[in-house]
Image (cartoon, coloured by chain):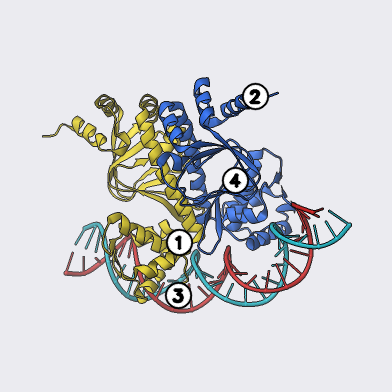
Chain colours: A yellow, B blue, C red, D cyan
Amino acid sequence: MTNPKNDNVLLMSKMPIFHNLSEHALKMLERILIRKTFAKSENIFSEGDESAGFYILIKGRVKVFKLSMEGKEQILHIMEAKELLGAVSAFAGNPYPAHADAIEKTEAFFFPRNEFVSLVKREPSVVMNIMANLSMRLQHFTNMIENLSLKEVPGRLGAYLLYLCKRTGCGDTVEMDISKGQLASFLGTSPETLSRIFKKMSEKNILEIKGRSVRILRRKDLKDIVDGEKVKL
Amino acid sequence: MTNPKNDNVLLMSKMPIFHNLSEHALKMLERILIRKTFAKSENIFSEGDESAGFYILIKGRVKVFKLSMEGKEQILHIMEAKELLGAVSAFAGNPYPAHADAIEKTEAFFFPRNEFVSLVKREPSVVMNIMANLSMRLQHFTNMIENLSLKEVPGRLGAYLLYLCKRTGCGDTVEMDISKGQLASFLGTSPETLSRIFKKMSEKNILEIKGRSVRILRRKDLKDIVDGEKVKL
DNA sequence: CTCTTTTTTTGACTTAAGTCAAGGATATGT
DNA sequence: ACATATCCTTGACTTAAGTCAAAAAAAGAG
């Protein structure tokens, strides 16, 4: 039978953000953390909310997104287990810059802002880990801006599929982990447009789509589309 | 007559990134820095280059940008004096994620990678300053993505003008600090489109444009355009 | 398994914005 | 002040992608 306290410490020790933390520091953290659960599609925070603290996901997934006045959404990030949510705001003391909704039943550790700030000050190694995290996100956003502004939708879709393929280390079949509607929002387009592009790519035998699983048949052509070579769709 | 060494230390002490550094640390840094000068439109580094170190600008300006295969550019950032250039790459050991060109005669301190990394490890306060810097950039990119994907070009232009206006604390006349072509690239559009929108906004008496100086005549209408209210242009 | 709800697809249409090309304006250097 | 190069504007045209509406398919609830 597992002790819930040790459980939390064990979980934390596996989080990249808490790597190299002493047992003592982890136990201190264990005392201030609050374990929270969110239902599917439950809102975690909204843009403009004052930051009360930050989250580390234990399981489930969260979408971080912006909303236009007309209700169109742009997904910035799909957060998974072990990822940090709201840390920049908690650290800088700014309101949250985007919305966050759970897209599955999600469990998370919540760390209140003050405790987090004082932890950061006492534990330099945490800062290093956070820096690494922020750097990765900057890189991610840099690519996102490049894609949104310099590529058209087929190119963005191709880049996403090739990225998924690389990340999951599969052969040529990728399992999309979000709905096509959500993918459209992530790629900065509409479900209709995405659907049409999937269709055209299937017709040209570049892809084969069965529900959420996509098989890449002509990787070369897909790469050309990503690189802006005008492959007729 | 000023001593160039003291000059460097004095300059550094005024850089936000080196705030709270001891006199000793600054003098150590002073020994490893290399002062570099770049001519207008000179390339500082290119996307994919191995990071040799990072820069802090003393004077001048640098554009950080991505290029599409067809040569279209998207400006990510216009860096000014006291800003950090290439620090994320230097710290994380990644190649530079974008290109950087001086857009004016620019002077900068260059800090070689190794010395920087060891400095960061010895001086926790530097890390804090860098974190603050990265946080601001993340926020900036978040807004950029929102604008690119959720607003159309008139909205992006409006947001930029209102931002400039706020930042310079002026009444209603803003001095644009970059050419219209570069502004187009920053807003993720073409010079032609930008020119047409400026014209339409002038015709509607929302703006008055004289070269690079823009007077905001109908702030309310401009805000409505930014917020996606369909103001007929 | 059936009914309901949500997601996805398709068609017809509209529109914002890109492209190409040429003329005008402005800046830069000698 | 001149010439040269760069930047900006304008017109005519093309096109990618958005919108609206409705049908088809898939997922979820009872």
Which residue is at the front of the view, A104 or B50?
A: B50
Whether labels 4 and 2 share one chain: yes
**In the image: residue C17, left or right of residue B123:** right
Name the residue carrying label 4.
B62
| Amino acid residing under circle 3 | Lys
Residue A232, labelled with which disc? 3
Alpha carbons under labels 4 and 1: distance apart: 32 Å
Do the CB atoms of the residues marked 4 and 1 lie less than 8 Å apart?
no
Label 2 belongs to which residue? B3
Relative side of A12 to B194, left or right: left
Observer-side mark, 1 or 3, equals 3
* Above or below, A178 relative to B134: below
> In front of the other: label 4 or label 1?
4
Query: What is the C-alpha distance between the residues marked 3 and 2?
Result: 64 Å
What's under tag 2, amino acid-wise? Asn
Residue B28, percent from left and from top: 50, 25
Nearer mark to the viewer, of 4 and 2? 2
Q: What is the chain identity of the residue bearing mark 2?
A: B
Residue D17 located left or right of residue B156: left
Residue A38 place in picture, x, y as percent: 30, 43
Sort mark 4 into few (<14), some (14-19) or many (20+) by Cα contacts within 10 Å.
many
Have a look at marks 1 and 3 and say if they share a chain: yes
Where disc 1 sits, the SS reads: loop
Residue that protrudes farthest toward the top in the picture:
B23
- Who's the residue at 48% across and 55% down the image? A146
- Say the numbered circle drawn on residue B10: none
Give the x, y percent position of residue A203.
Answer: 36, 76
Residue located beneath label 1 in the image: A189
Quadrant in which the N terminus of chain A is drawn = top left
Please report the residue visible at 35 percent of the width from the left and 40 percent of the height from the top. A84
